[in-house]
Image (cartoon, rainbow, N blue to C red):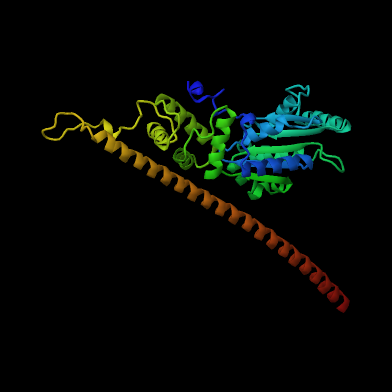
Amino acid sequence: MYTEFYGFKEKPFHLVPNPAYLYLSPRHQNALTYLEYGLAEKVGFIMLTGEIGMGKTTLVRHILNDIESDMDVAVIFNTNVLSDDLISLILTEFEIKHDQQMTKAKSLELLYKFLIDKYAKGRKVLLIIDEAQNLSDELLEEIRMLSNLQTDEDMLLQIMIVGQPELREKIESPRLEQFAQRIAVSYHLSPMDKDETHGYIAHRLKKAGGREDIFDDSAVEIVFENSAGIPRRVNLLCDAALVYGFADNAETVTGSIVSQVIQDKGGMGIVDSRNAPILLTDIVDETPGGKGETDPDLPGRLSAVENSIARLQAQMTFQVENLEKREKDAKDQLIVKLHRMLAAERKISMKLTYDYGRLKEKYLDLINKSK
């Protein structure tokens, strides 16, 4: 629709993860560095977390495109599986021939033979599990047990788990302490700031063959405030704004165009005509003596008011989300601190128990000698 008007070779704001459009903001670059380090050092477990739409899958696909030729990779996207199905699913993804009805012990034996064979040939094996926040504690424990498949010196299987923040919360719970100890590399992908959002929009516009400055500063600011710096939300807003800009024959997408998109779509959600909000400009003059017609100047004045209200709502939403994020970060830090304090207390308790045992032995020895 708007591609020719703006000079694009394709739509710049696809919702489908596309590694060709990967924008390496500082935090995305850090995430990529952590993941690449974990793979290069052959660590057992790697974990990547982030909010919905943060670009985790895009990062993973970028890594898969650049994966070394001596590595075999399996990717699992369906995490709503039963415990008995997990190993079978892994075998299927690694293209290991097996009987769906075989026991779990036999399936593990096949997987181990496969890993040994790859190790003997000098090949590395990587298992990537996306949407891992859906995994039950039982499945996570089974995945942890897979890390026991190793030689005396090397890991036979590297595992990368990718998921939403709930995954990190699960791993940090006391019942999965052993799992948490196996994670050697972990990174949480946080939202972009305003400058990074500006760079992200310009990058995608340029990648699609268009001008980098199609969105003016006011448009970028409103996009950032309403997207909270989350790439998928940015894509939703920018794609709709380009449609509106094309309809208005506007070569530059302005803040007022983006505000109109937000207003018509009911914020970040998509609403149909049956649920569309009633606009003040839809209200006609029903005052006594009125003729049921709108004041000629009323639409313009009300439109300005509506735009101001939309911006205030967007700012309020951004502030609320920012406060919620700070609250969660503070909670996470407190939980980590409490875990460390608990571990320290356990060490002290163990030492006291040991010292008490020694003293008790000496006391009993003295009692025996006195007899």
Q: Is residue 208 left or right of residue 187?
A: left
Looking at the image, the residue that sits furthest to the bottom is 370
Q: Residue at x 75, y 34 (%)?
A: 126
Can you tell which quarter of the image residue 89 is in?
top right
Front residue of 16 and 237: 237
Quadrant hosting residue 158? top right
Looking at the picture, tell me which residue is in the foreground, 155 or 23: 23
Residue drawn at (47%, 37%) of the image: 216
Q: Where in the figure is residue 295, as x and y percent of width and height? A: 20, 33
Q: Residue furthest left?
A: 289
Quarter of the picture containing the C terminus is: bottom right
Q: Position of residue 245 (x, y in %)?
A: 43, 28
- Residue at 68% across, 45% down: 186
| Residue 238 appears left or right of 184 | left
Residue 142 at least partly seen: no
Residue 9 at x, y = what percent?
57, 22
Residue 64 visible in rendering: yes
